[in-house]
Amino acid sequence: MQRGDGMHDAPAILATGLSKQFGGLRAVDSVDLRVPKANVYGFLGPNGSGKSTTIRMLCGLLTPTEGRIEVLGLRIPEQAEALRRRIGYMTQKFSLYEDLSVQENLEFLAEVQGLPRAARKIRVEELIESYDFAHRRRQLAGTMSGGQKQRLALAGAIVHKPELLFLDEPTSAVDPESRRDFWEKLFDLADAGTTILVSTHYMDEAERCHRIAILETGRLVADGTPAELTRALAGRTLGVHAREPRRAQAVLQSLVDVLSVAQIGNGLRVLTAGAADIEGVRSHLVAAGVEGDVTEIEPNLEDVFVSATHREGPPA
């Protein structure tokens, strides 16, 4: 699912020169962000890359050391209080009350968000129905599975119909099927006009976003649609099929212009720093006594990540 970048409309989030210093550590370093409205915008990066710190600054929970932030037209952190009722926030750690039932959790959150009594009852019933809790409304949250807890946390985060939803690695503790279902809910929200900023370390999730930003040690190293970012790597990814893939991998990793070599099944996926020299790669294998077939293959988002961060393999 793709959509325009909304450049002609005011963005949901606009940050320029955003930095955060913790003592001698520069956790976020001069980050510029423009998040279009009604998009699912992904933050991709390894642990310690600055994703959570950036999200907390955008929410008004942390004051930046430097930079300027506007969220939904409000200056942050100066107008953070006014922003609070217009956003939702969900982290990877289940934060609802485990000794309350599904319905009690949602009713409590609706009251905290200031929904009038009549509207509160209607909204809670809507969420119980649309998030498949009709038969679990009286079940204690603490007794539910990881996927069910995640779904309840999302329902709780949108009980007040926020315009903007921040999700900080929300699917890190659930199974693949629950992750898929969760993402379908996110696209339902985006189609209804909600802007979603979600951090993840799963490549398959990042590929589903309308746009993604890649952070590495506090710096923004890539920003664009998945298609734009992968297209920029055209001609730099090779597939190698060899009888001895481990030997072939050792040979290829010694080449100066090779950024990474990953074994996928019996084949190798090779990413080069510039335009790949197929004949050069083939001749190196032959010179090392390794038989192999070398072909150009389509780049993917993991290649984008490796190229942008100069790390091997997916983020931790």
Image (cartoon, helix red, strand yellow):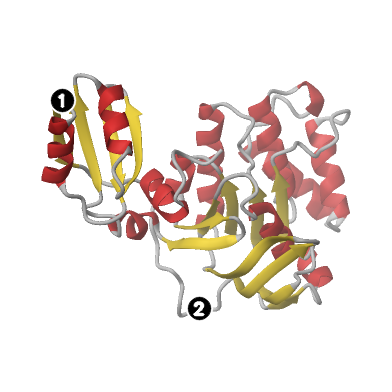
Q: How many marks?
A: 2
Nearest the eye: 97 or 227: 227
Picture residue at 50% right of the left edge, 78% below the top? 9
Picture residue at 73% right of the left edge, 25% below the top? 136
Q: Amino acid at mark 2?
A: Asp
- Judging by the rendered image, the residue that carries numbered circle 2 is 9
Nearest the eye: 227 or 83: 227
Residue 273 percent location from the top left of the image: 31, 53
Image disc number at residue 184: none
Picture residue at 66% right of the left edge, 55% below the top? 166
Instruction: Determine whether 182 is above or below 115 in the image.
Output: above
Instruction: Determine whether 131 is above or below 86 in the image.
Output: above
Residue 61 percent location from the top left of the image: 80, 61
| Circles 2, 1 touching at the beta carbon (< 8 Å) | no
- Judging by the rendered image, the residue that carries numbered circle 1 is 289
Q: Secondary structure at mark 2?
A: loop
Q: Secondary structure at mark 1?
A: loop
Residue 18 percent location from the top left of the image: 65, 71
- Give the CA distance from mark 2 to mark 1: 59 Å
Picture residue at 50% right of the left edge, 35% below the top? 180
- Which quarter of the rendering shows the C terminus? top right
Residue 9 lies left or right of residue 144; in this view the side is left
Q: Amino acid at mark 1?
A: Gly
Nearer mark to the viewer, of 2 and 1: 1
- Quarter-wise, where is residue 72 in the image? bottom right
Nearest the eye: 248 or 236: 248
On the question of residue 86 being in view, the answer is no
**Label 2 Cα crowd, 10 Å radius (few <14 / some 14-19 / many 20+):** few
Residue 96 lies left or right of residue 259; in this view the side is right
Q: Of marks 2 and 1, which one's residue comes earlier in the chain?
A: 2
